[in-house]
Amino acid sequence: MKYTTLGRSGLAVSSLALGTMTFGAETDAEQAHAQLDQYTEAGGTMLETADVYSGGQSEEIVGEWLRGQSAVARDRLVIAGKGRFSVGVDPRDSGTSRRHLRRALDGTLRRLGVDHIDLYQVHSWDPLTPLDETLGFLEFAVQSGKISYAGLSNFLGWQIAQAASAARGRFPLISMQPQYNLLAREVEWEILPACEANGLGVLPWSPLGGGWLAGKYSQHQRPSGATRLGEDPQRGVEAYDLRSAQTRTWRVLEALQGLADAHSQSMSRIALAWVSAQPAVSSVILGARTTEQLADNLGSVDVALTAVDLAKLNTASDPEPSAWPYGEAGRDQRSRVLD
Ligand SMILES: NC(=O)c1ccc[n+]([C@@H]2O[C@H](COP(=O)([O-])OP(=O)(O)OC[C@H]3O[C@@H](n4cnc5c(N)ncnc54)[C@H](OP(=O)(O)O)[C@@H]3O)[C@@H](O)[C@H]2O)c1
């Protein structure tokens, strides 16, 4: 395992975080506890949770495991939570109002069985709540000792810039969690530069594109069996019809297969090593259904991709922005060379 500090803060985290979205869903409590043991034994220190995962069950499963750990083992962990969405039956009980976030954070602490977590992230922008109200809650949460640091998730570039400048000097806003993988690189246009300019460490979610980059889906056969898209082909941003219709998907998978063969490593490890190598990234959030998958993914820390390998993957996965303002012409105008 490798370690780094998160964004412009002194918070030390492992370069691979453990995501808990499968807990209480495709991964039962026993298997989730086995993943948590395996991850911490490998030196992992960052647990990534959210109140909405399995309607709160995921946090309960993590809380149950935490209660079985020694004080020393618990102290080594950096626990991150997220709030914004409805966990109960009332869909209106959501958003980033002071009222919702206060109840959401208290619910998270209760389910985890702790009185404090290290990082609390706003799960997504809320167009109905003034940003100042949301930031006021985060400031209160830091001051009251319930959280040490605050972060964002799924914010756009301008939203990140507004939040970061309003938070400066008030409380530590240190991270941002976007979808980022070889099939979703559009965040490089506005979102990652906004994070870098504002000292936010990036925590990529779905680093394997929901399983696509493990090479399990085929162009000629619809998914079936115990896989995310086998169980629900239209699930989320990784939906089969959406991704299989893009030629880039198959180009990326071919490039990954080539490098996997060349390095005698799995495609998953190569894909995770690519995300880890991106300069804005602090810690990559792993997701796994099984301990076998997690073992595979943890092995990505030992994969060293060369500049040539990275260039191959960059070319195959290029989202091909139009020349202006994101493509080469735009980049040229924003560059300045002194020689
Ligand atoms: N902030 C947000 O809005 C947000 C959104 C999504 C996720 N997240 C966070 O990010 C974490 C990771 O997201 P994710 O689960 O979508 O990550 P992912 O790595 O893109 O996908 C994980 C899935 O891919 C398959 N898989 C993983 N490793 C594999 C391997 N080595 N070989 C074969 N298949 C493998 C498994 O699915 P199957 O076995 O079912 O195919 C697994 O559940 C979540 O746990 C959560 O903490 C945050």
Image (spheres, rainbow, N blue to C red):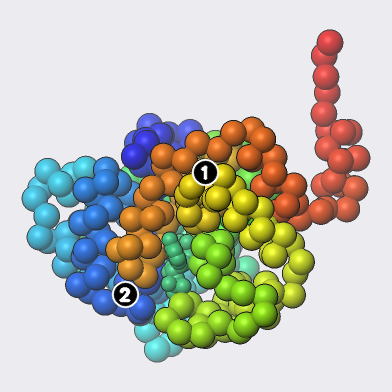
Quadrant location of the N terminus in the rendered image: top left
Relative to 335, is 282 on the left or the right? left
The x and y percentages for residue 52 are 40, 74
Say which residue appears at 82% left-offset and 14% top-offset. Answer: 338
Residue at image mark 1: 263
- Mark 2, Cα crowd under 10 Å, few <14 / some 14-19 / many 20+, is some
- Against 176, residue 126 (above or below) is below
- Against 332, residue 223 (above or below) is below
Q: Is mark 2 within 8 Å of ligand 1?
A: yes
Q: Secondary structure at mark 1?
A: helix
Say which residue appears at 59% left-offset and 47% top-offset. Answer: 259
Relative to 228, is 307 on the left or the right? right
Label 1 with label 2: CB-CB less than 8 Å: no
Relative to 276, is 325 on the left or the right? right
Label 1 sits on what residue type? Answer: His
Say which residue appears at 24% left-offset and 55% top-offset. Answer: 38
Q: Is residue 43 visible?
A: yes
Relative to 100, is 208 on the left or the right? right
Residue at image mark 2: 27
- Numbered circles on residues, count: 2
Mark found first going from the N terminus, 1 or 2:
2
